[in-house]
Amino acid sequence: MMKIDMTSGLTELADFCKRAAAATSRLASVRDQDVSIAQTPRKEVCRLNGRALYRIASRQPHRIPTPVLLVYAMVGHWAVLDLQDDRSFVRNLVDAGCDVYVLDWGHPTPADQFDDFGDLINIYMDRFVETIGEQHDIAAINLVGICQGGLLSLCYTALHPEKIRNLITVVTPVDFHADQEDERVDSGFMNVWTRKLAGEDIDLLVQAMGNIPGEVGGTMFSLMTPFRTLAKYNMTLVQAGQDSDTLMNFLRMEKWLSDRPDHTGASAQQWLKELYQDNKLVKGELVVDGRTVDLRAVTMPVLNIYSETDTIIHPLASKAMRDRISSTDYTELPVTGGHIGTLVARSKKVRDGIVDWLATR
Amino acid sequence: MNSSKHQSEIPDYLRQLADPWRAMTDMWVSWSEAIQAGFKERGEKASELLTRAWSSEFWRAGEFAPFIDELQEVFSLPRFADVPNVDLSALKPAASMLELAKLHQQYLAVSIPLWLAISRRFQAELAVREKSGEPVKSPGAALDLWNSAVDGTLMEFTRSGEFGDIQQRLLRAAAHYRLQLRAIGERSAHVFDMPTRSEMTDLYQRVHDMRKEIHQLRREVRALRGNTNSKLSTAARSPQDDENRHDVRPD
């Protein structure tokens, strides 16, 4: 039988109420316009059907002469790569001497619902890679793909190897069934959930929705960590509200989370059916615009960054790349932290890992 | 000849009584045959549907929208030019909504044992702490332990087959509901002479195919010009594509 000391209980309750009041007081002084993300100055270089290519402004000398294109996932907005000054993946790379471009998938509209991997890879990515090549008068660039963007980058590299000098993937799934080799209750929820659906369910969802609303992805992520979701606006917010910096950090993340772009229907069908369900990429059966994606065509240097504690992309799903590509210069960089934590960490480990690796190639 | 002779032998008053009787009998035989034909063609399926509708399992399982489809299929008739078509589709959104409500009930039904499981887990963890000589003394520690029990149990549940099954049915019901609402919207759009979602989707598909074709043609033109990275490749692009090139102020 649990025996609770009532005096300490009352003290804890009073302390919690005091903390809640402090958090409320700080929250009361913040307006939406005070919460800014993606603040690093940038210039729009090219725009095509709502997709944009930005060049991040830099006054630093370029230690890495070949420009770097960052490709983030379509399931979230790229702004998470530039969350705040001291937690900016983009700014970190710029400060370390990279000439950084960012691909913005924008907010797909119903008119984009038929855009499949072929369009994303062979029209938009290819156009932006060529634009960067033309601007710098070079034939090949450095490509950094993150999460789903990593998968698209890997496919792009396999289909257009001559245009990529070095490929870097960050928390990128390659083998979508690898989680079954090491089942963890806190990892690979999306894989388990998607495999429980029939292919027709996904077709029905796309037929009914056109594009997959960003809220669907948001719900999935909430279900993945149910308690964190339940506790977010009470315990976590009270904790975050104890100092202004932590509160603003929390609110910036909330702002990013609240802006989930829709996912184009046709590419969502491929993503969920052909990859999550049928695992076609590692089987060598993924076909993009009539061409089979052959990962053996990836022969250039590859740096694969993954997190051992990633709850969304199982580390084995990322590490599976090693045996599928033909590159003789393949490096793995394991990091700690969650899927998004890897991108918004204050630690410079990822940045240094990328820049030091690129500097020698 | 014999029969006419025989007929002529029947008294008139009897024939006067027999003729209407025979006419009535023929009519009932015709209707009986019609009913028989109806039963033969649709009766078996209709009785199967009615039996299903009376089953408690049917109401428990939901999936009412496909049931309406089957019902409509069983009782459908050829289309007539000047007779309004019997359309049960107006019932479908209600059926889909009923399905969604049913699924919410099922969520509640599974959540009760779930909270019992969480409580048992919490109790077990308390007992373990007690045995190991580290009993929980403060409400804060008890809350942490409770939260940990909630977290673990919910994560296990969201990966279970039971949850997967309800999620799948929820997804199907929500999709069906949305499609039914779209059908209503399309009928209204016709009334107000506005483009329907189906027409727009068809248009999007055509635009997409044209974009792809233009991209392919551009590639071919560039390949013909021989130098992918030359200035000519830039010239081959339509200036309208790059809508704006400008400095972006941070949001």
Image (cartoon, coloured by chain):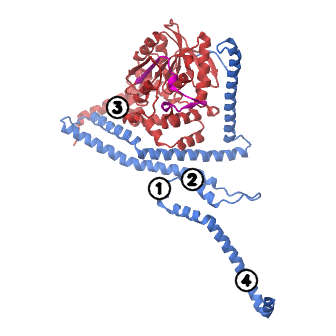
Of the 4 image quadrants, the one containing the C terminus of chain B is: top right
Q: Nearer the viewer, mark 4 or mark 3?
A: 4
| Residue A35, visible in the rendered structure | no
The residue located at (23%, 35%) in the rendering is B137
Q: CA distance from mark 2 to mark 3?
A: 52 Å
Residue at disc 2, secondary structure: helix
* Relative horizontal placement of residue B121, taking residue A215 as reference (left or right): left
Amino acid, disc 2: Pro
Amino acid, disc 3: Cys
Is there one chain holding both mark 2 and mark 1?
yes
Q: Which residue is denoted by mark 2 in the rendering? A: B66
Q: Position of residue A34 (x, y in %)?
A: 50, 21
Amino acid, disc 4: Arg
Q: Nearer the viewer, mark 2 or mark 1?
A: 2
Q: CA distance from mark 4 to mark 3?
A: 94 Å
Q: CA distance from mark 2 to mark 4?
A: 46 Å
Chain A shade in the render: red
Is there one chain holding both mark 2 and mark 3?
no
Label 1 lies in what chain? B
Determine crowd level at label 2: few under 14, some 14-19, many 20+ residues with C-alpha closer than 10 A. some
Asked which quadrant contains residue A309, the reply is top left
Q: Nearer the viewer, mark 4 or mark 1?
A: 4
Is there one chain holding both mark 4 and mark 1?
yes
* Relative horizontal placement of residue A7, taking residue B69 as reference (left or right): left
Residue at disc 1, secondary structure: helix
A32, B168: nearer the viewer: B168
Residue range in magenta is A281-306
Determine crowd level at label 4: few under 14, some 14-19, many 20+ residues with C-alpha closer than 10 A. few
Label 4 lies in what chain? B
Q: Which residue is denoted by mark 3 in the rendering? A: A17
Q: Which residue is denoted by mark 4 in the rendering? A: B22
